[in-house]
Amino acid sequence: MAKQLRDIEPIRPLLAHRPLAVFSDIDGTLAPIVPDPQDARVTDRARESLRDLMALGVGVGLITGRDLAKAREITGLPDAWYAANHGLTLSVGGVDETPEAVHDFLPRAQAVIRETAGVESVGVSVEDKGPIVAFHYRRAASPEEARAAIEAALNSSAAAAAFRVHEGRMVVELRPPLDVDKGTALEELSRRMRAGAVVCLGDDRTDVDMFRRVTAMREGGTPGASVAVESPEATDEVMDGADYCVDGVAGVEWLLGEIVRALRETAPSGR
């Protein structure tokens, strides 16, 4: 079970390593969960702290299920590195990369959207994320009915059979069956940053892949810590998978601010 972080001390030793890398999910971590996912935005305080971290030489990677354009819009951080669509698209130093295999799923995803259009009648919002299709049911009058309608629609969709089904906070996603997830994305961005230590934050089941990868990297010699974001919807899998936890987006804001403060205290004079 993740230990509650009440001060910076448990992760302070990581801050001495260079380069330091901070990886974070977006929705539910840097941005509060809202009824309509299109309205989500990173809080001003979190955004400012991430900008401060980058100014201090910290590598900042935002690892999200959102598509790349939407991730940039939500965060307002064009200079950060990104792993969008659960790692299917990377943006490294402003250069966007998508494996050729992903492109094969673009027309298949459109076919899924056409074949499952009926789910919108029960309050399901269908999000087109290129090679990924997300079915959000947070705003449905009956989430149970909506979840059942999604399952029935996917079972009757011929195109859906080409994808893997994943679930998150009030969302069902179809993703290409590739060996890519938020954990592989974290490791790849970390490698390219030449990170000496990593801190990662996340709130959902898909973020557990990041937590596990940090543990594996730590066992391989790269210091790191994972931080779960508590919420009423946080599953045991999330809370058991992380080293530490903080209370909601406000806790993330606090932690990022404390990291900035600690790094400034040890920064060479004149920086």
Image (cartoon, rainbow, N blue to C red):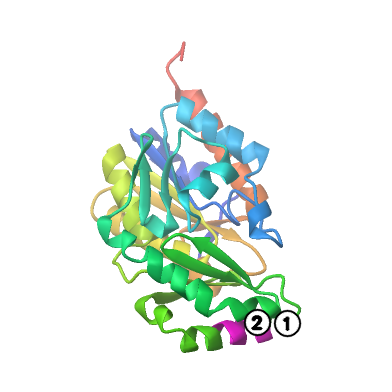
Above or below 11: residue 233: below
Provide the secondary structure element on which disc 1 rests. loop
Residue that appears at 56% across and 40% down = 256
Give the Cα distance between marks 1 and 2. Answer: 6 Å
Above or below 267: residue 77: below
Q: Which segment is the magenta one?
A: 144-150
Dot 1 amino acid type = Ser
| Along the viewing direction, whichever of 44 and 178 lies nearer the viewer | 178
Point out residue 270 in the picture as x, y percentages from the top left corner. Answer: 46, 10
Residue that appears at 57% across and 82% down = 150
Point out residue 158 in the picture as x, y percentages from the top left corner. Answer: 41, 84
Residue that appears at 29% across and 66% down = 179
Point out residue 188 in the picture as x, y percentages from the top left corner. Answer: 29, 49
Q: What residue is pinned by disc 2?
A: 146
Above or below 164: residue 183: above
Point out residue 47 in the picture as x, y percentages from the top left corner. Answer: 59, 37
Provide the secondary structure element on which disc 2 rests. helix
Please indicate whether residue 222 sits to the left or right of residue 158 in the image: left
Q: Main secondary structure of the magenta part?
A: helix
- The reply to whether callout 1 and callout 2 are in contact (CB within 8 Å) is yes
In the displayed orientation, state which residue is furthest to the right. 141
| Along the viewing direction, whichever of 196 and 165 lies nearer the viewer | 165
Dot 2 amino acid type = Ala
How many neighbours does mark 2 have within 10 angstroms: few (below 14), some (14-19), or many (20 or more)? many
Q: Which mark is residue 95?
A: none
Q: Is residue 149 magenta?
A: yes
Q: What residue is pinned by disc 1?
A: 142
Residue that appears at 38% across and 75% down = 163
Examine the image and state in which quarter residue 180 appears.
Answer: bottom left
Please indicate whether residue 149 sits to the left or right of residue 115 in the image: right
Q: Is residue 122 magenta?
A: no
